Image (tube, helix red, strand yellow):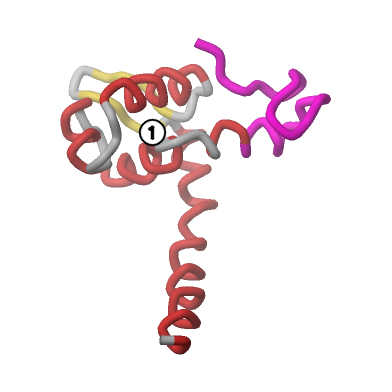
C-alpha cells in the first residue's frame, strides 16, 4: 500500500511538496471522514463503518491502511485511534467546522 509521501511525486506536484502530499492523502475518499470519526476515541472497524455510513468496506480498509502508514492513526487492541500526529491534524481541522456553519448560512439566505 502506498500513501502520498512528501518528497515523492504526488497528485498535483511532481516534486512532492509536503502540503501537496498531505492534500493528496486527505483528498482521498473517506480519509478525512475516518480522521473525523476517530475524534471521540477508539473505534473498531465496524464502528467506523457505521459512523461513516455509506463507505464501502474495501474503501474503509484501504484508507485505514494508508492513514496507518502515514502515522495518523494506529491499531490498538480495541480498534483504531488517532496518533499524536493525527490528533494534531484534527485540532488544525476543527476550526473549519465553525467556518462551515457561517458558510452554510449564506446558502440559507439564498433559499
Residue tagged 1:
82
Task: State yes or no: residue 52 in magenta.
Answer: no
Percent of width and height locating residue 64 = 38, 24
Res. 35 image quadrant:
top left
- Report helix, strand or loop for mark 1: strand
In the image, 6: left or right of 55?
Answer: right
- Return the residue found at the far front: 111
Q: Which residue is drawn at 49% across and 17% down?
A: 69
| Up-down relation of residue 35 to residue 14 (above or below) | below
Q: Answer whether residue 20 is magenta in the image.
A: yes
Crowding at dot 1, Cα within 10 Å, few <14 / some 14-19 / many 20+, comes out as many
As drawn, which residue projects farthest toward the top? 1
**Residue 19: % across, % down:** 70, 38
Q: In this view, does 91 lie above or below 98?
A: above
| Quadrant of the rendered image containing residue 101 | bottom left
Prevailing secondary structure class for the magenta stretch in the rendered image: loop
**Is 100 in front, or is 73?**
100
Place residue 24 in its image quadrant.
Answer: top right
Q: Which of 24 and 69 is in front in this view?
A: 24
In the rendering, at what x and y percent does residue 97 appear? 44, 63
Residue 37 at what x, y percent from top left? 31, 43
> Residue at left 50%, top 10%?
1
Residue in view at x 47 percent, y 21 percent: 66
Quarter the C terminus occupies: bottom left
Magenta stretch in the rendered image: 1-23
Who's the residue at 49% across and 23% down the image? 71
Which one is in front, 72 or 102? Answer: 102
Amino acid at each position: 500500500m502506498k500513501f502520498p509521501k512528501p518528497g515523492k511525486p504526488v497528485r498535483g506536484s511532481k516534486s512532492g511538496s509536503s502540503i501537496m502530499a498531505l492534500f493528496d492523502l486527505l483528498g482521498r475518499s473517506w480519509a478525512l471522514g475516518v480522521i473525523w470519526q476517530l475524534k471521540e476515541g477508539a473505534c473498531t472497524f465496524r464502528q467506523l463503518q457505521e459512523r461513516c455510513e455509506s463507505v464501502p468496506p474495501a474503501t474503509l480498509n484501504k484508507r485505514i491502511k494508508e492513514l496507518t502508514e502515514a502515522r495518523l492513526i494506529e491499531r490498538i487492541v480495541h480498534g483504531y485511534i488517532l496518533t499524536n500526529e493525527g490528533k494534531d491534524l484534527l485540532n488544525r481541522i476543527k476550526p473549519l467546522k465553525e467556518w462551515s456553519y457561517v458558510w452554510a448560512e449564506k446558502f440559507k439566505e439564498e433559499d
